[in-house]
Amino acid sequence: MSKPTVAIVGRPNVGKSQLFNRLAGKRLSIVEDTPGVTRDRLYAECEWRGRVFSIIDTGGIEPSNDNEILKFMRFQAETAIHHADVIIFITDLRTGVTASDMDVAAMLQRSGKPVVLAVNKCDKPGQPEPEFYEFYNLGLGEPFGISALHGYGTGDLLDEAFQYFPPEEEDDEDEGRIRVALIGKPNVGKSSLLNRVLGEERVIVSNVAGTTRDSVDAKLDNQYGKFTFIDTAGIRRKSKVEEKIEKFSVMRSLMAVERADVCVIMIDATEGVTEQDTKVAGEAHNAGKACIIVVNKWDLVEKDGGTMKEYTLRVREGLAYMPYAPVLFISAKTGQRVDKIYETICHVYEQNHKRVPTGQLNSILAEATARVQPPTDKGRRLKIYYMTQAGVCPPTFVCFCNDARLFHFSYQRYLENQIREVFDLTGTPVRMIVRQRGDKE
């Protein structure tokens, strides 16, 4: 059985994301004093009384609003309620009970799920203020006064939620799970691809660039393996990032790259490789992550017999620093070739974790140096004594030589290509560290 799930719901700007961050113990959800900042469902793991459980942060519920984004936020919250074992309904002491609170309370009662009522912004410990008692009118039982900002009352709140958790069972579902970050500039189809692989409308899809603001995690198990897909906000040029909220979103995307095992770099087929695409891909390359280049919206491109080959050459030219990354052509909208992504993810993940025996590595080195002599400078020739692998993710090799100054980067690249040719290493960058005799490092 999976971990218990607790959904945090309420109308906009009552402190849901602040409580989410408080319980998660880190700033996973964007907190800003602007209604509607959180749009998609966010997941995190917590522990209370020795029990690990999942919490879901949702967008604010506006029961009567025709705005397309707000309607979708309501749909996302309803989906979270459907999947939750317990619901924490957050209200705001300062505004009191509003008509929206009454509507949300009625919706939660209809769901039939256990509901714990939290009254946020009770920032003074001790006896609650007189306004606190009007929250009994919501008909959801005893309210719990909390301060998401300072942490007051959250222990009592979790104790109340804890009693509704299903019985504990052994669960090792996260073992061996590959974390996959979908990255790219805004509006290339990251959220569409996530919805396609999950088979549900998990995240908001809109033609408006910047719709996704948080990094959203979604687990998927299929015949290819266990995956956690991370949908990220599009990374735009700094000059285009004006809103404070969007600056947080870009930061979240870069953090998602850091915690991912594989980065799927998405490119819009109708635009080709742009300068911003090279910067986004560079973040994954510099972080040493396994990478796949996915050209989306392929269904919108007019084709003939050589279109894919020509386009691949253009991609290679635009992303010349990562020739190791496989290129896939898909359509998230129609599902064309989306299934190929899973096998490719598994393959590049294995290569990123590959270890090469030192004996085989030095046999390759001996053959490579015999075929192409190491460079010389002023009569002094580079001598490479031996090579060993120092680490993985990415594969990192250390070369010991007589003089590091003679080890030209072009010869390093030659040796890297020889290693790739023999041991594959598709989809992963390779690091090469040069040490000369006498180095104390």
Image: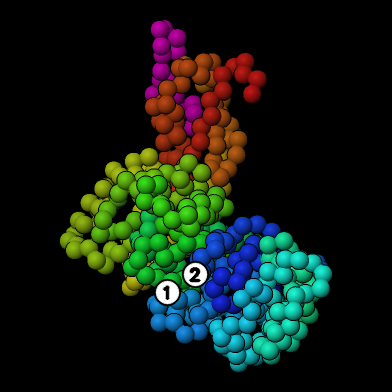
- Whole-number angstrom distance, CA of label 1 to CA of label 2: 9 Å
Percent across and percent down for residue 376 are 41, 14
Check if residue 149 falls in the magenta segment: no
Instruction: From this view, report whether residue 19 is shown above or below residue 363.
Output: below
- Give, as a three-letter code, the residue at label 1: Ile
Residue shown at 66%/67% (left/top)?
19
Percent across and percent down for residue 427 are 44, 49
Residue shown at 44%/40% (left/top)?
420
Percent across and percent down for residue 198 are 48, 73
Q: Which corner quadrant of the image does residue 55 belong to? A: bottom right
- How many other residues sit within 10 Å of disc 1, few (<14), some (14-19) or many (≥20)? some
- Give, as a three-letter code, the residue at label 2: Gly
In the picture, measured across the screen, residue 111 lies left or right of residue 53, that is left
Q: Residue furthest front?
A: 130
| Stretch of the chain drawn in magenta | 360-381
Residue for badge 2: 36
Circle 1 or circle 2, nearest the eye: 2
Question: As rendered, which of 59 and 151 lies closer to the eye?
Answer: 151
Percent across and percent down for residue 353 are 56, 48
Quadrant location, the C terminus = top right
Residue shown at 67%/75% (left/top)?
93
Residue shown at 51%/32% (left/top)?
432
Disc marking residue 69: 1
Quadrant location, the N terminus = bottom right
Mark 1 or 2, nearer chain start: 2
Is residue 191 shown to the viewer in this render? yes
In contact (CB < 8 Å): disc 1 and disc 2: yes
